Amino acid sequence: MAIDWPTVATTVLGSGVTAAVVTQGIAAFRDHTQRRARGRMVALSAAVALERFGCTCADLVADAANHHYSEGTMGAAHRELPVLQLSGAGADLNLLPIHVASLILEFEAAIGRADVDLQDTAPHSHFEQATPIFLRLGEEGFEIAMMVREKMCLPCSRSRDLDMRVEYLSEQREAFEREKVKVIDDLQIGAGANG
């Protein structure tokens, strides 16, 4: 019986190539799924960090309000923003889709700009100037955390404490804006009476 060497060579090479393709395909799929899982974990860490930042801003607003309305006997006037601690996720933002990483990086830049603005506030009007910064950034932190969770198909936070702080920031922002409008109206009425 004669061996058909071309058929043997074709069979060996074909099975070798097929095995190599299958092996590489499995490795590529495994790498893709692991990268995706790591990306989801980075996104979850970033969302939790953003929520923690928002909670800290809410606490600072409450503390500053206590300080202001108690005429300095309670609370404290804060001159620094909390740090957005991405707990190691910062280095891995490249695992996230670009639009999600962009949201987080843009927010970090906004915190830096606001921190400079906060340092420039005058001590006698610190509450009036700092509170809107804390309110805005706290709410933005919560909003971006929600967007990250939504875009990465992550579960929403079920923390009642978190919900209360989101609600508190919203109420305080509305109250602060009403107070600001009232002051402006009072100034305009006073200017009209003097004019």
Image (cartoon, helix red, strand yellow):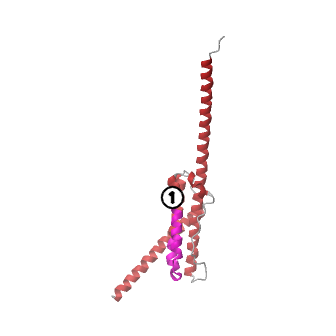
Q: Residue furthest front?
A: 5
Q: Dot 1, crowdedness within 10 Å: few (<14), some or many (≥20)?
A: some
* In the image, residue 118 lies in the stretch drawn in magenta: yes
Give the percent coordinates (x, y) of residue 155: 57, 53
Asked whether residue 67 appears in the rendered view, the answer is yes
Whether residue 176 is situated above or below residue 41 in the rendered picture = below
Is 191 positioned to the left or the right of 93 in the image?
Answer: left
Tell which of 112 and 173 is nearer to you.
112
Residue kind at label 1, given as amino acid type: Leu
The residue under label 1 is 103
Q: Residue furthest bottom?
A: 194
Give the percent coordinates (x, y) of residue 49: 59, 61
Tell which of 180 and 129 is nearer to you.
129
Q: In what element is the residue under mark 1?
A: helix
Residue drawn at (61%, 26%), measured in percent from left and top?
13
Tell which of 187 and 91 is nearer to you.
91
Image quadrant where one finds the N terminus: top right
Asked whether residue 158 appears in the rendered view, the answer is no
* In the image, residue 11 lies in the stretch drawn in magenta: no
Residue drawn at (52%, 72%), measured in percent from left and top?
116
Dominant SS in magenta: helix
Q: Which residues are magenta?
A: 105-134
Give the percent coordinates (x, y) of residue 105: 53, 60
Residue drawn at (45%, 73%), measured in percent from left and top?
177
